[in-house]
């Protein structure tokens, strides 16, 4: 049980550091560009709020001058021809936004808590197993002593 805090903190820090490397790699590889909506999102303007996100076809010109098209998540109140910001990867194709540092922080906390629970569970399971072994040994010793004492105590050996 003494190692529980150290194990939990170490595992949480390792998970956070690993996830932060992913965040930095994704931020380095992806960037935002401006694209135009090729169509009005389903449930288009007037039928949905700006806070709602919808999937819609977008088109953009890549850094190499080539035309690209794809389906991206856009504000629900946008209309065809509206400029929207989308994320692209190193190949110029649509990509998901990079993972946020808060996700890395959450992953670190979750891993630390899970490690703490696992270490505590292992400690309690180990304690229960040791107690079971000691109880078995003690009951066997009591049985052996009773076999010696019981005949004289109950009077069975007086015949």
Image: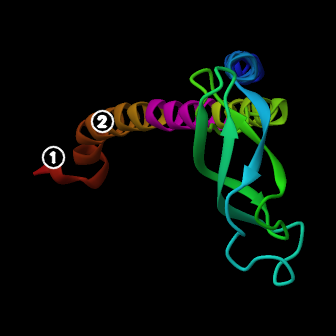
Q: Position of residue 21 (x, y in %)?
A: 70, 15
Residue 75 vertical position relative to residue 134 in the rendered view, above or below: below
Q: Quadrant of residue 77?
A: bottom right
Q: Which of 8 and 137 lies nearest the eye of the viewer?
A: 8
Q: Which residue is mark 2?
A: 140
Q: Secondary structure at mark 2?
A: helix
Q: Position of residue 133 (x, y in %)?
A: 39, 32
- Secondary structure character of the magenta stretch overall: helix
Instruction: Say whether residue 28 is visible.
Output: yes
Circle 1/circle 2 CB separation < 8 Å = no
Classify the position of the N terminus by image quarter. top right
Residue 62 vertical position relative to residue 132 in the rendered view, above or below: above
Q: Which residue is mark 1?
A: 157
Q: Position of residue 52 (x, y in %)?
A: 81, 68
**Residue at image point 17% right, 53% down:** 156
Q: Quadrant of residue 64?
A: top right
Q: Which of 157 and 127 lies nearest the eye of the viewer?
A: 127
Residue range of the region highlighted in magenta in the rendering? 117-130
Going from N to C along the chain, the mark reached first, 1 or 2, is: 2
Question: Which dot, 1 or 2, sits closer to the camera?
Answer: 2
Left or right, 20 with reference to 119: right
């Amino acid at each position: 049980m003494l190692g529980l805090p150290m194990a939990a903190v170490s595992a949480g820090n390792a998970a956070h550091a690993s996830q932060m490397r992913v965040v930095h790699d994704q931020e380095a590889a992806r960037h935002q560009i401006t694209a135009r909506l090729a169509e009005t999102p389903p449930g288009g303007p007037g039928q949905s709020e700006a806070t709602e996100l919808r999937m819609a076809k977008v088109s953009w010109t890549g850094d190499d001058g080539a035309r690209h098209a794809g389906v991206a998540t856009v504000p629900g109140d946008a209309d065809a021809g509206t400029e929207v910001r989308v994320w692209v990867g190193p190949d110029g194709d649509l990509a998901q936004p990079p993972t946020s540092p808060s996700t890395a922080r959450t992953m670190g906390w979750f891993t630390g808590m899970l490690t703490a629970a696992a270490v505590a569970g292992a400690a309690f399971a180990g304690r229960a197993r040791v107690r079971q072994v000691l109880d078995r040994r003690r009951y066997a010793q009591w049985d052996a002593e009773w076999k010696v004492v019981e005949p004289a105590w109950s009077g069975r050996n007086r015949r």
